[in-house]
Image: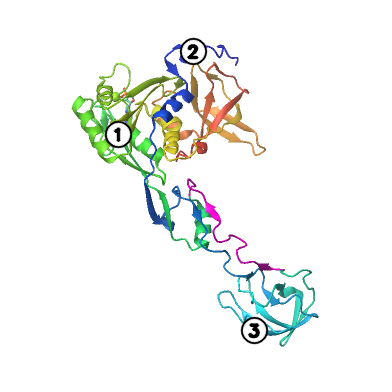
Amino acid sequence: MKDTTSHHDFPDSDPSAVTIDQANERIAQQLPSFTRTEQIPLLDSLGRILSSDVFSPMPSPPFRASAMDGFAYRFSDKGTERTVVGDSYAGHPGPDRLAAGDCVRITTGAKVPDDADTVVQQENTELHDKILRIVQPPKTPGHHVRDEGSDCQEGDLIAARGSTINASLMGLLSALGVTTVSVLQRLRITVISTGDELQQPGRALDDGQIFDANAPLVAALLNNPTISVSIANAMQDSLASVSEALKNAIQTSDIIITSGGVSVGERDHLRTVVDSMGGVALWKVAMKPGRPLSFGVLEGTTPWFGLPGNPVSAALTTLLFVLPALKRCQGLPAEPISVLKASCADQLTKLPGRVEFQRGVMTNDGQGNLSVSTTGLQDSHVLSSLAQANCFIRLPLSSNGALPGEEVDVIPYQFFSANLL
Ligand code: AMP
Ligand code: MG
């Protein structure tokens, strides 16, 4: 569908609303860095962030090794016959000294004798008793020999500070004998729901109550090796409860995330308390769902995100604002989210003036053509559609929807790296 607003229009038709990028910039400006480090066993470090450069403590391989099963000999010796004078097996080196015309039988990964420089693979030889005939001799010295340090030299930079330890780095560091690494300490994040209507799953629901979905949802979105999330008891809608919950959380957390309690017309205890704890901002972000977003640094130390109460809004604001902030405060680049193009199977309706994230199901026809259909009802309490979807359809600020067959932006869940799939 055609755009109905110009780019000069205020987002949300409300001059006080900010764009998603503006909200992220404002958060970034106030966000402290977290740089506490710890030394941990390499085997426990998957997914953690290196806090210092790692240099190779040794060459790898640590000795010249054979790349084949065959025979090791000196290339410059005359003729195509050799006398087999020993064996070098992986982990069991044979003799290092060879007289002219000698060779050793060698296996893959075994040490090449100091006096040898070339390996001929077994298939290219004939052996009669101890006499080896090289039927197809390698053309150059050094054939099938892995040089010492041909993977890494001692002192090479193996991984820079800020790298995430992944499986390949885990293998490489192990190959170099590294057993411990210095990493950033996990960020301690406390997630707190707010609302008198909330009940913990497992208890009985009284009239008018609902189970708390947000705390488990947000905690699960954030769950990753660089973060230690804990869920605190939900706050009641009272000044005392809000104040106590935040004061407790500040003692034990690097970052606090609340959900709910910031709607217009709410008894405004959360705002009152966070305002008394430091410069706190509330923005209307020109997006749907997730319009009201609060952020501040409580008591000058502890970033606080006040997410909207509706679960889909809480999830989306976690993905768009909290996750990039967590990367940033750990010194990682917060890259823009990648977007794919897909053909829209349904008609989508939307009002101009805000970016909308509708839940969609994306399919690939196997030829690289993507299409996306809507999950239906897009209200922000509809958690079943968040579970059913595998992507968000992102409709830009000025769009007023999409027609069947129109190309739309989609963000597959996996692009958020947030345990959504
Ligand atoms: P609020 O911002 O507190 O007015 O909440 C907006 C809507 O989200 C209301 O319908 C709340 O009942 C709902 N809500 C708030 N917190 C939660 C939660 N933790 N789990 C599920 N729904 C919630
Ligand atoms: Mg509430």
Which residue is found at the position 64% from the left and 36% from the top? Answer: 365
Q: Nearer the viewer, residue 288 or 180?
A: 180
Q: Which residue is mark 3?
A: 86
What amino acid is labelled 1 in the image? Answer: Ile
Asked if residue 417 lies left or right of residue 97, the reply is: left
Extreme-front residue of the structure: 155
Q: Nearer the viewer, residue 145 or 381?
A: 145
Asked if residue 358 lies left or right of residue 72, the reply is: left
Expressed as whole percent of the image width and height from the top left, the position of residue 103 reads: 70, 81
Please, what secondary structure does the residue beneath circle 3 have? strand
Q: Residues within 10 Å of mark 3 (few under 14, many from 20)?
A: some
Expressed as whole percent of the image width and height from the top left, the position of residue 329 reads: 41, 37
Asked if residue 179 lies left or right of residue 273, the reply is: right
Give the CA separation, mark 3 to mark 1. Answer: 70 Å
Expressed as whole percent of the image width and height from the top left, the position of residue 411 reads: 53, 32
Q: Is residue 365 visible?
A: yes
Observer-side mark, 3 or 1, equals 3
Is 167 covered by the magenta stretch? no
Examine the residues drawn in magenta and state their main secondary structure.
loop
Is 48 situated above or below 386? below
Q: Which residue is mark 1?
A: 192
Give the CA separation, mark 1 to mark 2. Answer: 33 Å
Name which quarter of the figure residue 316 lies in.
Answer: top left
Is 154 covered by the magenta stretch? yes
What amino acid is labelled 3 in the image? Answer: Gly
What amino acid is labelled 2 in the image? Answer: Phe
The magenta stretch spans which residues? Answer: 143-164
Q: Earlier in the sequence, mark 3 or mark 1?
A: 3
Q: Residues within 10 Å of mark 1 (few under 14, many from 20)?
A: many
